Image (cartoon, helix red, strand yellow):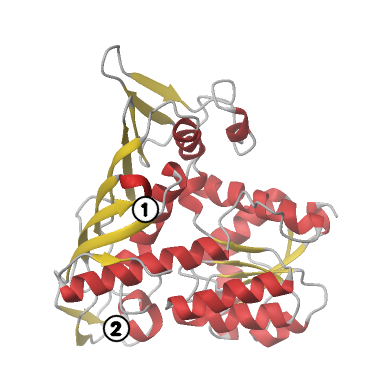
Amino acid sequence: MRLSEIRAGVVGVGFIGVAHVEALRRLGVDVIGVVGSTPERARAKAEAANLPKVYDSLEALLADPAVDVVHIATPNHLHAPQVRAAFDAGKHVVCEKPLALDSVATADLVARAGAAGLVNAVCFNIRFYPLCHQARALVGSGRLGAPRFVTGSYLQDWLLQETDWNWRLVPEQAGGLRAVADIGSHWLDLARFITGRRVVEVMADLHTFVPVRRHPAGPVETFAVGGGDEELIEEEMASDDGAGILLRFEDGARGTVSISQVSAGRKNSVSIEVDGADSALSWYSEDPDRLWIGHRGRPNEVLQRDPALADPEVRRIIGYPGGHVEGYPDTFRALFAEAYADIARGGPSPEPTYPTFADGHDAVAVTEAIARSAREQRWITVER
């Protein structure tokens, strides 16, 4: 089957759902419809963002035999039931993270995916910046020596003010963790992807810096700018605005990461450094086409993203020549291209090149350990 013959439906028409539609269209995939929280909201968004036809419900989309793949880009608490429904309907699934709100549910989804023999992907798109793949190649080939210290951060400012609001601040929809589950999970996945090593123990300090927020009664889209004269509701907050986390990896490597959604001026800032026994590397999302490589006894290097300079396994996800910056939207295209190659073949390959439900399960297991560590104020072993 060719990509142009695959038909997809997208559930969720917020910021991320629209990003999914745009990336699929770039690949030549036929996105035949979308589902929103209400048909009325979906139709308004479809008109504004040039989306395809609107299904009145998830059930209507799943009942359409023309739909081969379902992309789930809804609030977190809906992921697990919607994934189960899609599998029951025989559809391949691409799901936003977190895969579910707890590891019991994610383990169930991993088992269901295996039993169904359907392609299952979790949208850890950050790892699909090409130089993150190059970083993985450098570590995997031994060119850095054994990883010793993994450090970095994921910082945003879109929830800095007390009037900033979104469904991610509602525990019933987002889960008990917020900044760590929302963006910290991306960093943790990136660290595991680059190093090839899982986190086995954590020590976490979580904090709510904005204890009371004021918000409108209706929904507010992610990254939307507040305003207007409507009356605001006051609500006490318990979820994490920021976190500092110590990490222990397999094979003895150590790490530390800072996570924040209240860092003024940081719009979507991801940084990671891996210090090996021989050399080091560092990558920064706001300068994504450059990979710093550090040395002790010779000059440091800056590797620019360029197919001619990349390892063979990295070239396949690079879409443009060197000097033509690849950014955030390109990560979705690259991830979906890998997953849809398996969909075109009819099922998951033995060793998928994209993040699967197993990766989604691992991320939730780590974040659960982080939450427990913060509560109990001690090191916690990740239970898988």
Dot 2 or dot 1: first in sequence order is 1
Mark 2–mark 1 contact, CB under 8 Å?
no
Q: Residue furthest front?
A: 251
Tag of residue 216: 2
Quarter placement of the C terminus: bottom left
> What residue sits 59% from the left and 51% below the top?
335
Q: Residues within 10 Å of mark 1 (few under 14, many from 20)?
A: many
Quickly name the residue at label 1.
187
Taking the image as shown, residue 380 lies to the left or right of residue 194, namely left
Vertically, is 221 above or below 276? below
Vertically, is 377 above or below 176? above
Q: Residue furthest right?
A: 1
Q: Residues within 10 Å of mark 2 (few under 14, many from 20)?
A: some
From the viewer's side, name the closer residue of 225 and 284: 284
> Tag 1, which secondary structure?
helix
Quarter of the rendering containing residue 189:
bottom left
Taking the image as shown, residue 309 lies to the left or right of residue 192, namely right
From the viewer's side, name the closer residue of 132 and 155: 132
Quarter placement of the N terminus: bottom right
Q: Is residue 223 visible?
A: no
> What residue sits 56% from the left and 52% below the top?
332
Quarter of the rendering containing residue 180:
bottom left
Q: Is residue 38 visible?
A: yes
Tag of residue 278: none
The image position of residue 253, as x and y in percent, is 30, 44
Q: How much space separates mark 2 and mark 1, taking CA atoms? A: 31 Å
The image position of residue 283, as x and y in percent, is 36, 36
Vertically, is 288 above or below 20? above
**Residue type indicated by callout 1:** Trp
The image position of residue 43, as x and y in percent, is 60, 78
